[in-house]
């Protein structure tokens, strides 16, 4: 069901400073910068590598305010790993399978994610304390 590690989400207080760090320390490049108002974040997808199942990224997440999920995370835990995103071929089917396996779903239906992906989150209490995101890449002319 899982096809790859799509990305690791990292909460940060200063997105521009973290972008500069990942560029200089690891040679990563920015694939996209977006503001996701629904999730209350400004985010950057830093390209790591391409593989047969798709690309992988480090996702840097800066909250748009203190009363957002990432804002509350930073207040409680400070900067660091926020979640792991796994690629799936069909996020709706993956949600059904996970729910049938007894894993609590944060999202009952997919929602809009970075770079046009369809995403859904699984409850961390059922996955060893790790907030887990399922990511279905957008359909592009190249992927048809």
Image (tube, rainbow, N blue to C red):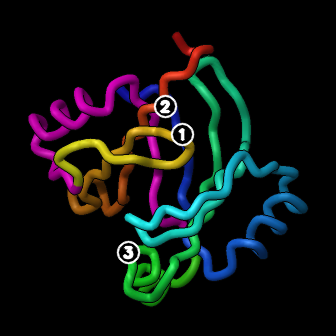
Q: Is residue 69 magenta?
A: no
Q: Determine which residue is flagged by label 3.
A: 69
Is any atom of residue 80 visible in this view?
no
The magenta segment: 80-106
Q: Earlier in the sequence, mark 1 or mark 2?
A: 1
Residue 114 relative to residue 101: left or right: right
Q: Determine which residue is flagged by label 1.
A: 6
Q: Earlier in the sequence, mark 2 or mark 3?
A: 3
Please report the residue visible at 22 percent of the width from the left and 56 percent of the height from the top.
106
Q: Determine which residue is flagged by label 2.
A: 137
Height in image: 81 above or below 28?
below
Q: Is residue 99 magenta?
A: yes
Q: Position of residue 11 (x, y in %)?
A: 55, 71
Element assignment for label 1? strand
Q: Position of residue 41 (x, y in %)?
A: 50, 69
Height in image: 77 above or below 90?
below
Please report the residue visible at 63 percent of the width from the left and 38 percent of the height from the top.
56
């Amino acid at each position: 069901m899982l096809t790859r590690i799509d990305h690791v989400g990292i909460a940060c207080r200063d997105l521009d400073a973290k972008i500069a760090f990942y560029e200089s320390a690891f040679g990563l490049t920015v694939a996209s910068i977006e503001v996701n108002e629904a999730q209350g974040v400004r985010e950057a997808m830093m390209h790591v590598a391409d593989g047969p199942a798709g690309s992988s990224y480090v996702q840097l997440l800066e909250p748009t305010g203190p009363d957002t999920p990432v804002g509350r995370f930073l207040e409680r835990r400070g900067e660091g790993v926020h979640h792991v995103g796994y690629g799936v071929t069909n996020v709706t089917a993956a949600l059904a399978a996970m729910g049938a396996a007894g894993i609590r779903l944060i999202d009952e239906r997919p929602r809009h994610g970075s770079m046009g992906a369809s995403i859904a989150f699984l409850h961390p209490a059922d996955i060893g304390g790790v907030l887990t995101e399922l990511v279905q890449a957008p359909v592009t002319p190249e992927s048809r």
